[in-house]
């Protein structure tokens, strides 16, 4: 008797890759993570982590997989040749390219996400200046999907908003048509649409079925929201390497640094700060974070006023490529310093939700937290005090969220 089909989600984050295998009933059958073996900006490290995880799926589950979808960090882009061979390291989502700002003004209109010098388009122009017009420009998730298909033609709509794709008109800006680099852009497909069937050589090498369907995924933060399964009145904050705030709205929101993604018949809007748990790991190990957090009284104030950015530049709640971190003064007490850093992140989160409300989003009645930071009870209480609403945690991995897109595509 043929067993029920399963679907697979691949989540490419800043620090590594996680996969999730779901049943058609949404039950999680398997999940596993792997750190990148090289630099985050090395696409070969993305591929090796994916290969390791896919080959390690138990055989009894591998044989039942029927569809797969990939999410990745929004804005991380690389140049490759027509066969998908990377021409160098990827440019990460957090990198601003202020030298191309004058060029952006003539390419995209006001309100387009690509107008910022922190956009994918800005990084794309830097790559074009380096490698020329005879290249392909692909974001992280699209490149991995291309590897599985052995076809790098496609790009998923949500991953390409910061490159200039317009979800309202379903087109690139008209100015792109006359650019000598137009052919570097991907052929855009809607999130959740079927891209094709896995390449036979990849199926054999990875131990996967040769009829496995590859589905256009989404961004890593969108996948996290889908995993949290928010209800009306809920907002979702992803407490990962970066801090991401998302909520569903009836209409798209337009402003620098704000993204509006189409998920089914609804709009998922929000923004991503460059700040997040990645800054905390610069100062403390995971064990130190756990121990020092226990020494914090989250119902008191630290007396510090920090802006824990990893370096110059911010995307959201303000779009300012020159905004500087504030990481001093550093007190003698490590616990007090961590207290101040967590308060600084809570302040950025609060400003993010205020920004979305100013643009027309409803004030969240509850915040669902997802990501590694969601497990920290002191941080949760600090955020609850600053945000003024209940904060809960969801431990379902984002890989399960993007697997839901594969599941929906399989149902048809």
Image (cartoon, grey):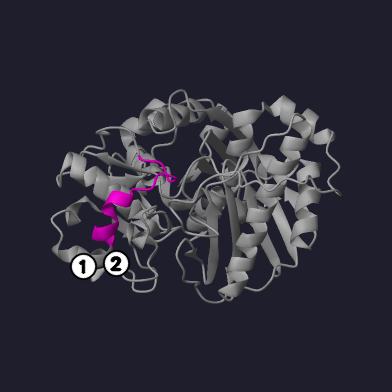
Residue 202: name its quadrant: top left
Q: Quadrant of the N terminus?
A: top right
Q: Is residue 338 above or below residue 314?
A: above
Q: From the viewer's perspective, is 107 left or right of 119?
A: left
Whether label 2 touches label 1, CB < 8 Å:
yes
* Residue at figure coordinates x 38%, y 30% from the top left: 42
Q: Earlier in the sequence, mark 2 or mark 1?
A: 2
Identify which residue, 26 or 307, lies in the foreground. Answer: 307
- Specify start and end residues of the magenta stretch as a single range: 91-104
Q: Quadrant of residue 208?
A: top left
Residue 1 is at least partly visible in this image: no
Residue at the spot of label 1:
175
Residue count near mark 1 (Cα–Cα under 10 Å), binned few <14, some 14–19, many ≥20 = few
Measured from the top left, where is residue 126 in percent x and y? 26, 45
Q: Is residue 183 left or right of residue 12?
A: left
Q: Is residue 220 magenta?
A: no
Q: Residue at x 64, y 67 (%)?
A: 354
Whether the magenta-drawn stretch holds residue 92 is answered as yes
**Quadrant assignment, res 175:** bottom left
Measured as percent of width and height from the top left, residue 380 is found at: 77, 48
Residue 318 is situated, as x and y percent measured from the top left of the image, at 52, 60
Secondary element at image label 1: helix
At 61% from the left and 61% from the top, the residue drawn is 352
Label 2, residues with CA under 10 Å away: few <14, some 14-19, many ≥20: many
- Residue 108, label in figure: 2
């Amino acid at each position: 008797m043929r067993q029920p089909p399963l679907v697979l989600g691949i989540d490419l984050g800043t620090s590594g890759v996680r996969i999730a295998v779901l049943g058609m009933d949404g039950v999680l059958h398997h999940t596993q993570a792997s750190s990148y073996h090289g630099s985050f900006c090395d696409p070969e490290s993305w591929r090796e982590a994916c290969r390791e995880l896919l080959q390690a799926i138990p055989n009894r589950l591998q044989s039942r997989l029927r569809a797969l979808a990939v999410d990745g960090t929004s804005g991380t882009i690389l140049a490759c040749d027509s066969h998908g061979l990377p021409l160098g390291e990827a440019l990460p989502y957090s990198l601003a390219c202020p030298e191309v700002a004058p060029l952006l003004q003539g390419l995209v209109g006001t309100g387009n996400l690509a107008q910022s010098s922190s956009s994918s388009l800005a990084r794309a122009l830097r790559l074009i200046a380096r490698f020329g017009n005879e290249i392909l420009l692909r974001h992280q998730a699209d490149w991995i999907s291309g590897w599985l298909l052995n076809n790098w033609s496609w790009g998923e709509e949500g991953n390409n908003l910061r490159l200039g794709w317009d979800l309202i008109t379903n087109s690139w800006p008209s100015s792109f048509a006359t650019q000598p680099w137009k052919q570097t852009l991907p052929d855009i497909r809607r999130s959740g649409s079927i891209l094709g069937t896995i390449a036979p050589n990849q199926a054999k090498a990875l131990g996967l079925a040769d009829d496995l369907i590859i589905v256009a995924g989404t961004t890593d933060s969108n996948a996290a929201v889908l995993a949290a399964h928010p209800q009306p009145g809920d907002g979702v904050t992803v407490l990962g390497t970066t801090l991401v705030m998302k909520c569903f709205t009836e209409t798209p929101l337009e402003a620098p640094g704000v993204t509006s993604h189409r998920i089914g018949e609804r709009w998922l809007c929000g923004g991503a700060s460059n700040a997040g748990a990645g800054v905390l790991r610069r100062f403390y190990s995971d064990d130190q974070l756990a121990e020092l957090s226990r020494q914090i009284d989250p119902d008191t104030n630290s007396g510090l006023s920090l802006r824990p950015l990893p370096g110059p530049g911010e995307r959201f709640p303000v779009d300012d490529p020159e905004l500087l971190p504030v990481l001093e003064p550093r007190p003698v007490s490590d616990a007090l310093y961590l207290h101040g850093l967590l308060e600084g992140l809570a302040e950025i989160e609060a400003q993010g939700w205020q920004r979305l409300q100013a643009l027309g989003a409803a004030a969240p009645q509850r915040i669902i937290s997802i990501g590694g930071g969601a497990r920290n009870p002191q941080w949760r209480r600090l955020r609850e005090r600053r945000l003024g609403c209940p904060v809960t945690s969801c431990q379902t991995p984002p890989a399960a969220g993007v697997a839901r897109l594969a599941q929906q595509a399989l149902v048809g």
